[in-house]
Image: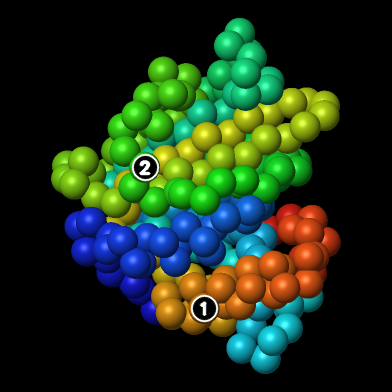
């Protein structure tokens, strides 16, 4: 089920997507010829009012325009940390052993150039697939691995099409995906459950 977006995602849709991605965790990243696949752990409650035992979802950014990625071997504020060079066909192996923290923040969609310039001079990978990439929507993803080794990840994807499914293979519409997120966050606020102990497997995704 492919979801096609307008050139600029409407504000009400952006707000729902921002909520859905808030405090999610990057689990897996892979780049294909025409698609970028990212697996996340999401805060998501199904229509039965339950947190599934496995909250991983695979988001495919189909027919993407560009992806830029920074893989820093150090903390976010370490300006001298090594920036690892990555080839598109090897990207998934660099995420296999990572245990990234959640993406804390309320905005991910169409953040503008100012946010990108904060790390665009530290790129591990920069792949352009479409000439019209500048006119596409963007999503900014990030994560930190605290401990040994310290790793900081920043990703920007330019896109106008995505598909969403659970890791079990159930396809979700945009409405179902965002409604599940809203239910999850409503429950979190209601019960005071922290984002670190909602049901999720923390299992690594294997393709």
Residue visible at 63% across and 39% down in the picture: 143
- Residue named by callout 2: 111
Q: Height in image: 92 above or below 198?
A: above
Q: Residues within 10 Å of mark 2 (few under 14, many from 20)?
A: some
Q: Quadrant of the N terminus?
A: bottom left
On the question of residue 161 being in view, the answer is no
Residue visible at 56% across and 40% down in the picture: 142
Left or right for 38, reference 81: left
Q: Secondary structure at mark 1?
A: helix
Residue that lies at the very extreme toward the top in this rendered image:
80
Give the mark nearest the N terminus, 2 or 1.
2
Q: Height in image: 38 above or below 82?
A: below
Mark-to-mark CA distance, 2 and 1: 23 Å
* Quadrant housing residue 166: bottom right
Residue 178 coordinates in the image, percent (x, y): 49, 73
Pick the front one: 21 or 94: 21
- Residue named by callout 1: 179
Pick the front one: 199 or 193: 193
Q: Secondary structure at mark 2?
A: loop
Pick the front one: 160 or 92: 160
* Quadrant housing residue 133: top left
């Amino acid at each position: 089920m492919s979801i096609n977006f307008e050139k600029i995602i409407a504000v009400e849709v952006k707000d729902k997507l921002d909520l859905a991605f808030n405090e999610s965790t990057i689990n897996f990243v892979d780049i294909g010829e025409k698609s970028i696949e990212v697996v996340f752990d999401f805060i998501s409650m199904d229509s039965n009012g339950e947190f599934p035992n496995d909250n991983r979802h695979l988001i495919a950014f189909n027919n993407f325009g560009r992806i830029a990625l920074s893989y820093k071997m150090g903390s976010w504020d370490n300006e001298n940390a090594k920036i690892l060079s990555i080839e598109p066909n090897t990207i998934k192996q660099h995420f296999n052993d990572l245990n990234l923290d959640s993406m804390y923040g309320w905005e991910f969609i169409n953040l503008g150039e100012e946010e990108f310039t904060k790390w665009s001079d530290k790129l591990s990978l920069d792949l352009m697939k479409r000439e019209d990439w500048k006119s596409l929507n963007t999503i900014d993803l990030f994560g930190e691995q605290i401990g040994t080794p310290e790793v900081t990840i920043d990703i920007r994807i330019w896109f106008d099409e995505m598909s969403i499914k659970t890791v079990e293979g159930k396809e979700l519409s945009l409405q179902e995906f965002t409604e599940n997120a809203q239910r999850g966050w409503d429950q979190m606020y209601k019960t005071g459950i922290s984002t670190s102990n909602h049901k999720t497997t923390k299992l690594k995704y294997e393709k």
